[in-house]
Amino acid sequence: MIADDDHLVLRLARDRRDVRAAQRLRYAVFVEEMGADGPLVDHAARLEADAFDPIFDHLLLVDTRRDPATLDDVVGAYRMLPGDRLGPDGRFYSDAEYDLAVLRASGRRLLELGRSCVRRDYRGGLAMLHLWNGLAAYVADRRIEVLFGVASFPGTDPARLAVPLSWLHHHCLAPPALRVVARPPARAEMAILPPDRLDRRAALRAMPALIRAYLRMGGLVGDGASVDRAFNTTDVCLVMETAHLSARGRALLARGMERPA
């Protein structure tokens, strides 16, 4: 997959070096910027890793002008796990925070998304659009029916996120057939404020750009947030049916189908 800019190449990770380059980018974003930590974070090598990395596909946006030997050539990343890759006892990353029973029981083609990030000096341009196009191609090629994954608010105090969390609960709650449920003890209620005390613009302004993008594509949220203290975030689980994507989402998917993989 070739991105529109001739120095940006969009492709799946091909080897261990590529995965380490994605982990280097994740360290810069999630550890250095957001204060995350975890048992497999390698501070000496500046790598943010976890036990799920070997089974995920890693979508990379590579700047060919940067030296691959430094591991700093990957400027955008997404990781993706098709449900049919799991064995009968296999677990998704999101299982640690959410009960995914309704998705498993659906019998539909599932894709878990996560670890979406872009290097700081590439934000605000086309980098995220390139990653969305690559994701659309991946989804179309595998005939995915339901996408899901956790997306994060910075910080671990849900009370400080009362406006956006409440707005998501009251206006974007997934139907029962797709409504994953946050697990205790990390579960936090989202309906902190009543609907009549919420302002849509204020709620959207308080949301990270990635969550707003999912909502524009037709994303819905599960029941409850999950406080991830190791990652220094409050997470919500977004769920999207590809058959019910918004016009923007359908356009991305169609564009992805036209791009060679």
Image (cartoon, grey):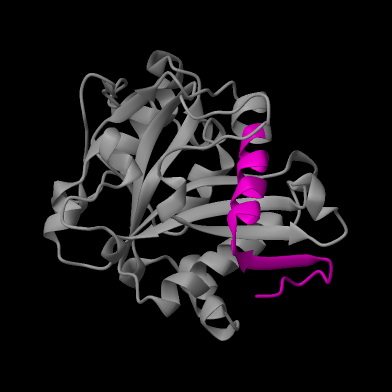
Quarter of the picture holding the N terminus: bottom right
Residue stretch rendered in magenta on the structure: 1-27
Residue 236 on the magenta segment: no
**What residue appears at the point 48 percent right and 71 percent down from the top-left corner?**
138
Question: Residue 152: image x %, image y %?
Answer: 47, 34
Q: Which residue is located at x 44 percent, y 57 percent?
A: 80
Task: Give above or below for 96 relative to 129.
Answer: above
Residue 126 visible (yes or no)? no
Whole-percent x, y for residue 127 in the image: 70, 56
Task: Say if residue 51 shows up in the picture.
Answer: yes
Q: Nearer the viewer, residue 191 or 101?
A: 101
**Is residue 216 shown above or below 230?**
below
The residue most toward the right is: 65
Q: Position of residue 112 (x, y in %)?
A: 37, 54
Does 130 sit left or right of 89 as displayed? right
Q: Nearer the viewer, residue 203 or 24?
A: 24
Residue at image position (32%, 29%) is 225
Q: Using the image, determine if residue 12 lies above or below residue 257.
A: above
Residue 214, position as x, y percentages in the image: 46, 52
Which residue: 44% across, 17% down? 156
Is residue 14 in the magenta section?
A: yes
Q: Count the numbered circles shown.
A: 0
